[in-house]
Amino acid sequence: MKFDKCPCGSGNVFKDCCQSIVAGEQKAKTAEQLMRSRYTAYVLKDVNYLVETTHRESRTSDLAKSIRKWMKQVEWLKLHVVATEGGSELDEFGHVEFIAEYIGNTGPGRHHECSVFEKVDETWFYVGEENE
Ligand SMILES: [Zn+2]
């Protein structure tokens, strides 16, 4: 798959945005960057990246399987980052609220999530969806 602009919707050129992060050449500096790169990995169908960027404690044995299932069911169209809290280069934790538009078997839909991220040894990880 070739992209000019990054699939994450940042407006930046793909190679200057999520490409090198998903490829493992660069680390996400902020929780938002990791969140965007994970969205891009869904678009690219990069299951390994999604597993590897999931926090150790959230990495269930069937994680890869459930990610693959999601990928088969939906095609991601667009990402909107609604809000971020923490998650900067100086933080250990971050929250990112986003809406991801997709088209699924039953038509178009929106996935609205507030994600929690934690930095472990200078690397950001996706912990999971925030509990209300
Ligand atoms: Zn991007």
Image: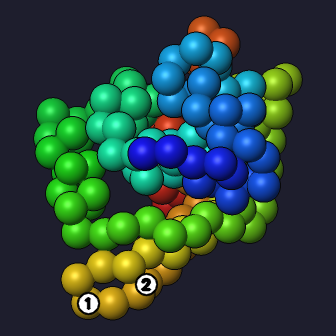
* Disc 2/disc 1 C-alpha distance (Å): 8 Å
Q: Assign the C terminus to one quadrant of the image.
A: bottom right
Q: Assign the N terminus to one quadrant of the image.
A: top left
Q: Residue at x 40, y 30 (%)?
A: 49
Report which residue position mark 2 lands on: 109
Report which residue position mark 1 lands on: 106
Residue 76 higher or lower than 43, as above or below: below
Residue 106 screen position, x and y as percent = 26, 90
Residue 1 higher or lower than 29, as above or below: below
Please name the colour scheme applied to the rendered image. rainbow
Q: Callout 2 environment at 10 Å: few (<14), some (14 to 19), or many (20+)?
A: some
The image quarter in which residue 103 lies: bottom left
Q: Amino acid at mark 2?
A: Gly
Is 92 displayed left or right of 68 in the figure? right
Residue 53 higher or lower than 10, as above or below: above
Label 2 close to label 1 by CB (< 8 Å): yes
Q: Does dot 1 land on a helix, a strand or a loop?
A: loop
The image quarter in which residue 14 lies: top right
Is 122 displayed left or right of 46 in the figure? right
Q: Callout 1 environment at 10 Å: few (<14), some (14 to 19), or many (20+)?
A: few
Residue 59 screen position, x and y as percent = 30, 33
